[in-house]
Amino acid sequence: MDVAHIQQQLREFAVARDWPQFHTPKNLVMAMSVEMAELLEHFQWLTPEQAVALKDDPARLDAVGQEMADVMMYMLRLADVLGVDLGDAIARKMVLNAIKYPAP
Amino acid sequence: MDVAHIQQQLREFAVARDWPQFHTPKNLVMAMSVEMAELLEHFQWLTPEQAVALKDDPARLDAVGQEMADVMMYMLRLADVLGVDLGDAIARKMVLNAIKYPAP
Amino acid sequence: MDVAHIQQQLREFAVARDWPQFHTPKNLVMAMSVEMAELLEHFQWLTPEQAVALKDDPARLDAVGQEMADVMMYMLRLADVLGVDLGDAIARKMVLNAIKYPAP
Amino acid sequence: MDVAHIQQQLREFAVARDWPQFHTPKNLVMAMSVEMAELLEHFQWLTPEQAVALKDDPARLDAVGQEMADVMMYMLRLADVLGVDLGDAIARKMVLNAIKYPAP
């Protein structure tokens, strides 16, 4: 995934619509939370088995993938606005997790 | 960001701890929602100006970056479990958004 | 607010539609989270001043009140399913909060 | 549940700590979302059966009840700040739901 390229596209998309005034970090985390809940909504009434089987239903999987994309776009936009390097943040958190949850 | 590599690391991390039994799509979206709220928590009492200024406070930015990483790791794990290509999903959603929100 | 009466109405509403099979505690907290985000959505792009002013816009306030009602109905349903006395839980939590956050 | 009395207590609690400046509607919905996720967190890795059985575990049920109280207190505070009558909002939403989901 070319994060920098997607972030540039999202930035240009926002600028062309005069949206950067709304894209404060506070608003972006709220918008990301809303998209996160739309992803959650697809799973709320499913049994664990139905949730697993969802991946074999192309229409539902596409709808779920669209919600995942919505969350990701706000995540990449927030990282851009805050100047956070997501790949670096993930790498460092994985080190911390390996210490916090040692393998048995 | 090397998504496939991170996903492989997350998969091996989960397998080594016998966690895949918990990593159903339904549970992963719930866990992602919880991490999302921990990210939201950093911003809940801030004014818009304070939220913007957070990026100049290295300690708080690091804490925020860690929460962003937590959300991202569950996102990448969910994409792996469901077989969703996130880069492809984002590219397709950006086309839909360009139609939905035409530039003025 | 007559909590017991509302809970009885919600229970009968669910039974008449054969929904209790879906109303597990896990599903109800997910559904409540989704409604919570629909409430959040009304505020995501507002400035603090616009959010305060929302109470003077009857149409928007009615829409926000409907989302608050949706969250409340899942909350009351969950309390019913789990056997939690909400009034008692609030009273006890207020005592704990008074200890945790002593008045200056 | 004596909603007006609890709201008065919450108002006095906030005033005594100089918190009303933070209790804008936007911040209150964010804080409520965070508490909502702490409630969700109790259920994230549970099977549906374990989630149902939680009500027979007094310690866990008390912890869950505390999170429910946290959500409720922000809900009642928000209703107070916005001037929303929750009992009335619920009654009206139940009429709408009866139309939207007719009993079979």
Image: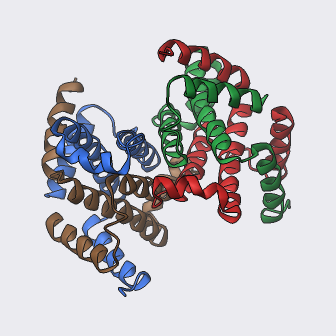
Chain colours: A green, B red, C blue, D brown
Q: Is residue B18 or residue B83 the one in the foreground?
A: B83
Number of numbered callouts drawn = 0
Q: Nearer the viewer, residue B104 or D65?
A: B104
Question: Taking B104 as reference, is D43 above or below it?
Answer: below
Horizontal arrangement in the rendering, residue B49 relative to residue C40 (left or right): right
Q: Residue furthest top?
A: B99
Q: Nearer the viewer, residue C66 or D26?
A: D26
Report x, y in % for residue D81: 23, 58
Apparent side of residue A19 relative to residue C74 in the rendered image (left or right): right
Residue C65 seen in the figure = yes
| Position of residue C69 in the picture relative to residue D74 (left or right) | left
Instruction: Please tell me which residue is depicted at 53% across the width and 35% down the height of the picture.
Output: A20
Is B96 placed above or below B30 here? Answer: above
What is the quadrant of residue A3 in the picture?
top right
Residue drawn at x 26%, y 42% is C64
x and y percentages locating residue B48 in the rendered image: 47, 52
For the question of whether residue D41 can be seen, the reply is: no
Rendered-image quadrant of the N terminus of chain B: top right
Quadrant of the image occupied by residue B27: top right
Coordinates of residue A85 in the picture (x, y in percent): 76, 45
The residue sitting at 48% across, 18% down in the picture is: B101
Residue B102: image location, x then y, percent: 49, 14
